[in-house]
Amino acid sequence: MNKYISVNKEGIKALQRTFKVNGKEICERCVKNALAYRTNNELARKIRFAAIKHHGGCTYYNIPEGEFFFDSDSCWHAVYPNGAEVYLDKQTGEGVVYGPKGNVVAKYANVLLSQIDDIKEQAAALR
């Protein structure tokens, strides 16, 4: 999983002007390395903090499909590389696994948190 902070070009320029080393502005590469978590020294941590607090920065994660759920309209939704999908309704407790061709493979009533890993494994194993 990769993590990074996204800041627009103006934000990067502002971060360069804000942080100085030996009285000189830091270079753009220094800021980008800090935002991409390639460096983790005191300066990099300050740059990341300032990017989020003062320059509209937003943290993003690159996560492989199937390792997370989207949460929208009171429903959890996971998509897998094989084309399978899992929908878990938080209000009704129902769960549905769709196969790679869109067919319903399994339905669950009153899904418990302890069952979610098994449901995810089932979806990931479909062909």
Image: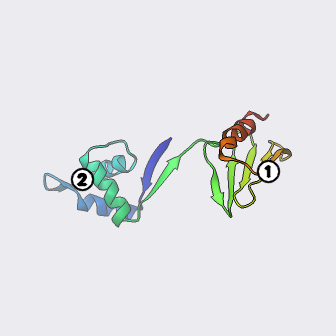
Q: Is residue 64 above or below residue 46?
A: above
Residue drawn 27% across and 58% down?
A: 16
Q: Are marks 1 and 2 in contact (CB under 8 Å)?
A: no
Q: Is residue 86 left or right of residue 31?
A: right
Element type where label 1 sits in the image: loop
Q: Is residue 17 left or right of residue 7?
A: left
Q: Quadrant of the C terminus?
A: top right
Which amino acid, by three-letter code, is at mark 1? Ala
Task: Give residue 112's position: percent from left, percent from top.
Answer: 69, 47
Residue found at the very far left of the displayed protein: 22
Q: Is residue 74 visible?
A: yes
Give 48 or 11, whichever is nearer the viewer.
Answer: 48
The residues tagged by marks 1 and 2 sit, at their Cα atoms, a distance apart of 57 Å
Give 65 or 108, whichever is nearer the viewer.
Answer: 108
Label number found at residue 26: 2
Residue drawn 75% across and 59% down?
A: 92
Q: Dot 1 corresponds to which residue?
A: 109
